[in-house]
Amino acid sequence: MSRRLKRTASASANSLAPYSDALPSLKCKGQPVFRTKVVRDVACILDLNPDVAKWCTPAPELAWEALPHRPDFLVFDNDGNVRFIDAPDREVAVSEIDLISAALGQGASYRRMSNEELYDGFRVQNARDLLQYVNFHVTLADRLRLLAVLDQEGSLTMSDCFGIVRHGEPVAVVASMILHGFLEVDLDEKLISPETFVRRIRA
């Protein structure tokens, strides 16, 4: 594809009305504007990534010669690394090598996520299911009770956890504690179920 055609495709994609849904975000800095549903799915993955401290979308521009490009995400990791990320559906008028160089000039990295990386396994759907409970408040009593039993048992199934909760809706309690870094589950192998094992995360 010629540079001219790439630029046209990119402009066309960026002119579409932003995608929106009612799903809240966990680690977003500022007000997000999602270019497409695929971008929203990447945001879900970032929210559930324990290495990510915060992210924003769209990112500031990366300028390369006369062809500025605004990546889908600017991501700040807990270890201090900064990353520019494009979703798999992004058409760009600048080569990836040029964007990597431009990002390095700003002390960051750049990459375009692959479709397989995003949609292989069940992580996106599990993330979307959990993020419905971002704003749910877990009582201190339920949190301490569940953590104490997990300390004794090592791990429990979801259904076992539900039986320990006393003051809140059990699914919401466990989901909120996963989102806020108290508990962990396998998000990739299959959809979260009553048989999914839950473990405590220790700081």
Image (cartoon, rainbow, N blue to C red):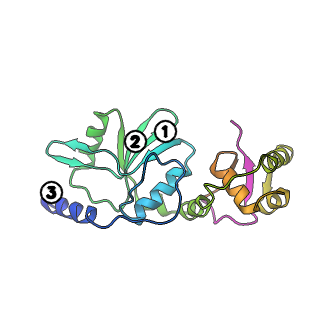
Q: Mark 2 near mark 1, Cβ–Cβ under 8 Å?
A: yes
In the image, residue 151 lies in the stretch drawn in magenta: no
Residue 87's x, y, as percent?
38, 57
Residue on which disc 1 sits: 77
Query: As rendered, which of 15 and 96 lies closer to the eye?
Result: 15
Residue on which disc 3 sits: 3
> Which image quadrant for residue 122?
bottom right
- Horizontally, residue 175 falls left or right of residue 88, namely right
Residue on which disc 2 sits: 83
Residue 186 in view, yes or no: yes
- Horizontally, residue 145 falls left or right of residue 179, namely right
Q: Quadrant of the N terminus?
A: bottom left
Picture layout, residue 81 above or below residue 130:
above
In the image, residue 201 lies in the stretch drawn in magenta: yes
Q: Secondary structure at mark 1?
A: strand
Residue type marked 3: Arg
Residue type marked 1: Asp
Q: Which residues are magenta?
A: 188-203
